[in-house]
Amino acid sequence: MSKYTEDDLREELKTKEYEYGFYTDIESETFPNGLNEDIVRAISKKKEEPEWMTNWRLEAFKVWKEMTEPEWANVHYQKPDFQAISYYSAPNSKPKYDSIDEVDPELLATFEKLGISLDEQKKLAGVAMDVVVDSVSVATTFKKTLAEKGIIFMSISEAIQEHPELVKKYIGTVVPTKDNFYAALNSAVFSDGSFCYIPKGVRCPMELSTYFRINQAGTGQFERTLVVADEGSYVSYLEGCTAPSRDENQLHAAVVELIALDDAEIKYSTVQNWYPGNAEGKGGVYNFVTKRGLCEKNAKISWTQVETGSAVTWKYPSCVLKGDNSIGEFYSIAVTNNYQQADTGTKMIHLGKNTKSTIISKGISAGKSQNSYRGLVQISSRAENARNFSQCDSLLMGNECGAHTFPYIEAKNKSAQIEHEATTSKIGEDQIFYCNQRGIDTEKAIALIVNGFSKDVLNKLPMEFAVEAQKLLEISLEGSVG
Amino acid sequence: MELKEKLVSSFMAFENTVDVDSSVHDIRIDAMKAFEAQGFPHKKLEAWKYTSLKSILKHDFSVFPKENEALDYKDIKKYFIHDIDAYKIIFVDGKYSSHLSATTHDGIDVCLMSSALAKPKYKVIIDNYFNKIATKDGLSSLNTAFSAEGAYIHIPKNKVVEKPIQIIHFSTGNEAALMLQPRNLIVVDENSHVQIIERHQSLTENPVLTNSVTEIFANKRAIVDYYKIQNDKQSASLIDNTFVNQKQESIAKVHTFSFGGKLTRNNLNFYQNGERIDSTMKGITIIGDKQHVDHNTLVHHIEPNCESHQDYKGIFDANSTGVFNGKVVVEKEAQKTNAFQANNNILVSDKATINTKPQLEIFADDVRCTHGCTIGQLDESAMFYLRSRGIPEKEARGLLMFAFSNNVLDSVKIPEIKSRITKLIAQKLGVNIGFDL
């Protein structure tokens, strides 16, 4: 990111309120509830997909029908009824509110704390607003810069139309349709998502984000992302948004596939702050995501995630270190409060020689929440000199929450070096006392300590995200400590 | 016939041979039902993900061994810790061997499960303790259903048992394949102290499968020291289920030394039912060939101010497989818990495998729980240091590996066991360490 200076950032922040375009689908319609072959066909037809794509979806649907929901995760929830969901709903362009005064004041207060501008607030809360003319030009400028470098960045539906050869070559190669229940479901019915291709030797000049892209509103509950970094390229991809999003879809089953070819590097950052349900644990989003990256020779994939939302999270961004000298990284902060449940972690599959992986996972549980780390480090017998370092720390606030760690380590090569450490503790009374003594009130002191606790991960986020994520942590834990 | 069917049908015959009071009879019937429903564990079960019993269960094990010939003490002396005076409870092919044993009823009861189950004077203890903490999973239930023989140890209040107690199970191979199901009950009352050494030993190459259940009750301020020496023949497999229930301020230590056997599975479960309890689990595993050792531990912290320490070291050569699955559960009430868990491993061969899963489940906030786990190699510079001082590579390697596993021995209280284990380690590593500890 050598060309991306602070000035750029300042400029970007200034123009940020314009980044949101307004997309109106004239033919807005929703499919009837339920899932069968006809629905899958209809989705495909609606998107005017080529035949191979339709068949691919049908194949996935067939597999899905045979599968059962996974039960092994350390989460408890009412299973969604898959026949009671509508699998296609065009982006809802109708404003939910006529003026900002109608919006839940609690939500507005949160926006305020995050420092989100008024126009942006309106957009996020779904308030009707005038279309900002400039937004189109901002998005176009980005598109132009990208196009000059030969970078393809568009919605996956467009990509299927415009670059079928690329999509066909890579989709489903890292997360096969048969991979798991939710991946199969996603493959059959995915509504939209992003596609990104970085050509050989190109360093993407900006953080790619769904933020900056027009026409992205309401990609719906079955998002599909495919990022391909060709040889020697670099890309940093941001997903999600720190602002709380009140989504009407209860079930989210996304699939993200990353492919880093020789010498390429992909940095994928996520901030997830979906509706976690109310303080009594009613409602909230189920977030069942399959994320996986494949590293070829000398490639590097780095996952960074800040998970604060959703009632139930089930997410394991993984790296398959196939090529020699490839590197996988996973940095995660998972915060659960009230009745939230998170079962998250990573898998590092070492196949190539001299592969390295780092796992840093910080779990913070408050209220009545349950927070689990579940990880797998696997060293195959041919992975000479593989190296792994894992650290999982948990912080407990209050005596009604739980923190769990389930690390699996499987080594089949004698030259492997694996270290795993985990600790669980609470915020020390002496730490709080130290802060109090210096005139910092308890709530601020806790925010300070939590930030220190999660610093290792926050540092890995792109700068503009890091600042917001820090505030988000504070807000998520507000009122959790007496 | 599948082993499961064979066992189920043998159960009726077994029930006719033992004359027991009704309460144990009911426990057995229930246990048999539980086994019928669950069967043997398979790889689909999370706790058995890395250990398969398939290859072992295919043998046609005989469940009721024939009467055997008496063993001569001098032939089997080496399997005893013979340089110390000890109480001895010796079984040969599952049958009590009176001439090899040295039991007592003098103030303490060191005797047999069969007599404890039969005699009315033990009824109170049996009613209060028998099958109270053993889990109801397939294998433990199977053992409960067939429970008839084993060691029965009851130490009343305020007794320090002067001599250690040795429990050894021999199998002579007079059956083509033998399945043993010893059942031990150890009750240590307030302020008492006992040391126990346990060993399973096969004397021939005929396959043996031992499915053992030991229930240990450490009451208030009791101290229990338990040593398991596992250095069996390549034909022998052991599934050891040990359950320890601790009352307040008690101290229980279990040391497991696994150096051999085709498949060894140690299910070691600690339940802390009281405050200020100390639980220690330590182990050294040094295996090669196609051996498989699986340590599956559980510490359940139920009440506040308790501690637990786990330290397992493993060295794996040739085609061996090591599994460590350590679980620490801290309940909501168990504030101020201090739980420590470490698992360090060295893979010596490219064909060896280690699967480890240190697991924490914590529901209390004011706790200090840590686990650490490493898989690595010997320090190159330490190797160089030793070699530059004229120590051959093999010996240098042996010394370093010995040093790696040695700190587990620090908490061993019986010097004779320490030196025996030191010798065994040296033997396993193929070096002459050149010093005794």
Image (cartoon, grey):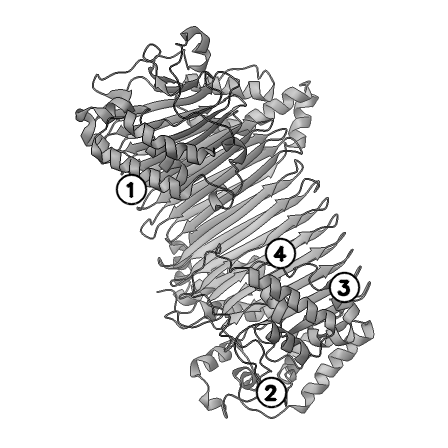
Expressed as whole percent of the image width and height from the top left, the position of residue B12 reads 32, 32
Q: Position of residue B99 (x, y in %)?
A: 33, 9
Asked if badges 4 and 2 are on one and the same chain, I answer: yes
Q: Are marks 3 and 4 on the same chain?
A: yes
Q: Is residue A156 left or right of residue B131?
A: right
Query: Are dots 1 and 4 in contact, CB under 8 Å?
Result: no
Q: Which mark is residue A28?
A: 2
Q: Is residue B261 left or right of residue A358?
A: left
Q: CA distance from mark 3 to mark 4?
A: 21 Å
Chain of residue at mark 2: A
Question: How crowded is the residue under tag 3: few (<14 C-alpha within 10 Å), some, or many (20+)?
Answer: few
Circle 1/circle 3 CB separation < 8 Å: no
Of the numbered discs 3 and 4, the one sitting upstream in the chain is: 3
Q: Nearer the viewer, residue B133 or B162?
A: B133
- Residue that mark 1 sits on: B273
Residue that numbered label 4 is attached to: A318
What type is the residue that disc 3 sits on? Lys
Q: Secondary structure at mark 2?
A: loop
Q: Are marks 1 and 4 on the same chain?
A: no
Residue B170 percent location from the top left of the image: 42, 18
Q: Which residue is mark 3?
A: A169
Kindly give the residue lying farthest to the left in the view shown.
Answer: B121
Distance, label 3 to label 2, CA atoms, is: 31 Å
Q: Compared to A381, does B285 lie above or below?
A: above
Residue at 38% over, 22% down: B197
The answer to whether marks 1 and 2 sit on the same chain is no
Task: Measure the alpha-carbon separation of dots 1 and 3.
Answer: 59 Å
> On what subunit does the disc labeled 4 rest?
A
User: Quick one: label 2, few (<14), some, or many (20+) residues within 10 Å?
Assistant: few
Marks 1 and 4 sit apart, C-alpha to C-alpha, by 40 Å
